[in-house]
Image: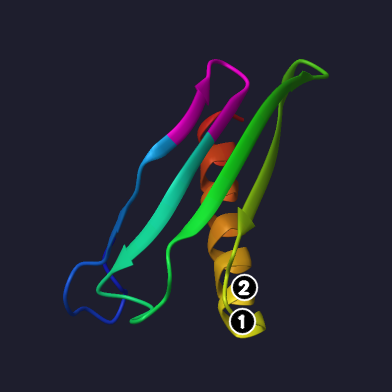
């Protein structure tokens, strides 16, 4: 990822703990070049068929404080909205 303001690229890396295709992913989330000092967090994404589409339930755990949680909330909403636009 790149910030709109420029600067160094931002990376996310981690390890998968569970891959249950096609319904569930569980993995770690580590930032590089963003959120300095933030500990590793955990993401669970579940997919289910729903009214001819797909319902996505995403849980991002172990975020260290409310402000960081809110920034991730906004980021996930934006990412899911972009994905939705691809398939509408």
Most foreground residue, 2 or 19: 19
The label on residue 16 is none
Q: Which residue is mark 2?
A: 69
- Of residues 6 and 48, the one nearer the viewer is 48
- Mark 1 surroundings: few (<14), some (14-19) or many (≥20) residues within 10 A: few
Tag 2 and tag 1, C-beta contact below 8 Å: yes
Mostly what secondary structure, the magenta segment? Answer: strand
Left or right? Give the position of 39 relative to 68: left
Q: Position of residue 26 (x, y in %)?
A: 53, 37
| Residue, far left | 8
The residue that disc 1 covers is 65
Q: Where is residue 77 drawn, in percent x and y?
A: 62, 57
Q: CA distance from mark 2 to mark 1?
A: 6 Å
Range of magenta residues = 17-25
Residue found 32% across the figure and 76% down from its top: 34
Residue 11 magenta-highlighted:
no
């Amino acid at each position: 990822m790149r910030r709109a303001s420029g600067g160094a690229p931002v990376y996310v890396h981690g390890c998968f703990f569970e891959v249950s295709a096609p319904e569930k992913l569980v993995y770690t989330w580590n930032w590089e070049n963003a959120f300095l000092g933030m500990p590793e967090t955990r993401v669970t994404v579940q997919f289910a068929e729903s009214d001819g589409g797909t319902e996505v339930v995403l849980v991002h755990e172990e975020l260290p404080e409310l402000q960081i949680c809110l920034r991730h909330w906004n980021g996930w909403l934006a990412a899911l909205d972009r994905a939705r636009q691809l398939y509408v």
